[in-house]
Image: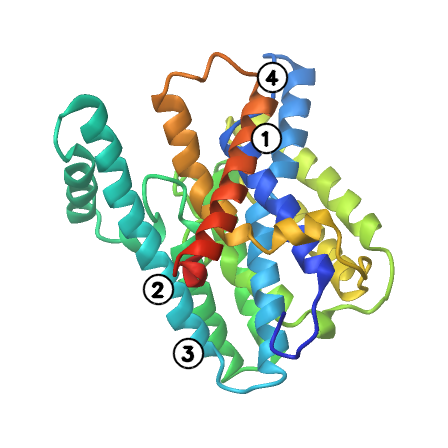
Amino acid sequence: MNGSGRHFYSVDFAKAIAAFLVVCVHIPLFAFPQSACGTVCKAAYYGAVNSAVPIFFALSGFLLQTRVAVRQHVFPGYLKKILLITAFWYLFYLVAVDVVELLRTHAGFLHSREMFGYLLRKPHGLLLNGTYYHLWFFPSLVSSTALLFLFTTRCRPRTVLVAAGLLYCAGMLGQGYGALLGGPDLHVDTRNGPMSGFLFMAMGFYFEKLRKVRRGCLRYIALGLVVSTAENALLLSAVHRLPLYGLGSVVLVFGLLHFICNEEIRKENPLARIGRYSLGLYALHPFLIYLYGRAGLNDYLLPLAKACIVYGLALLLTIELRNHTRLRTVL
């Protein structure tokens, strides 16, 4: 339920799909041969699964806008909430991984020492990279929300979108496009921080002002997948880099926002119910993948089965923890 008292089942549906795609990023479902056909298939696969986090950014912006439309000054409260979530999961992974390693090897708190050593060498890593366990989305959401708040209170929507677009283009240069255009390959992971999140959040926040037509969401989504595939294949062939987000991601997210605003799903369904637990699914699945590997089970199941097991266990854990503990705020 958003701040207006209106529930978008399409949002919950999209969250459930995006959460599974995130799992499929970390558990690749296919092995791609070293051939032209394999390159295209790999480009198509990652064009689809890498759309997951942009979807989460866009949905965050969209839901934030629905709250702002009803109550002003919601940004500070939202920032406090995601800062709390970020701090909780940082602490969870810092402690939980050490406990597992201590039980397995009796080697002491190696993970904590590695983490603190990394942060002392690269303090910006705390804000940009999250933990070692794929949680960079949380600090990126914090910085993107802060930028959105800063710009929306001082600039017109068009200015916000242009600024976010320029930052996104700069981020694309760090994902292989710089080398493709003849410049040096920066080898900078510019998915992190606000380089990509700011644009997708701004698209969600201002979508009612962006859209000119009421239908055609599937057309945009299909076009976004095609463009992402072409981008990935080009960069894989030319500079051997796989960009996370590019022009195709923007088109795909635009189509998804059409899908949500047109309320293509008007009634609750099983996927929409699962989508309510997407935060817990996102936060817990890396830990379950880690446990799965530490238990030596990687060679016993097909990747699709492993992905489904991790997704299902993360869902069950989230439901149980939300219902029987005080962790509802961070799940």
Closer to viewer: mark 3 or mark 2 = 2
Q: Which circle's residue, 3 or 4, is located before the other in the chain?
A: 4
Q: Is residue 240 left or right of residue 94?
A: right
- 105 w.r.t. 165: above or below: above
Mark 2 or mark 1: name the one nearer the start of the chain: 2
Q: Which residue is mark 1?
A: 308
Q: Please tell me which residue lies in front, 240 or 115.
A: 115
Q: Measuring from the top left, give residue 284's x and y in whole percent.
A: 44, 43
Q: CA distance from mark 3 to mark 4?
A: 45 Å
Label 4: how many Cα within 10 Å (few below 14, some 14–19, many 20+): some
Mark 2 or mark 1, whichever is nearer to me: 1
What is the x, y in percent for residue 56?
A: 57, 54
Amino acid under label 4? Phe
Name the residue carrying label 3: 76
Does the image show residue 178?
no
Mark 1 and mark 4 lie on one chain; the one further toward the N terminus is 4
The residues tagged by marks 3 and 2 sit, at their Cα atoms, a distance apart of 12 Å
Which element is circle 4 on? loop
Q: Which residue is mark 2?
A: 84
Q: Earlier in the sequence, mark 4 or mark 2?
A: 4
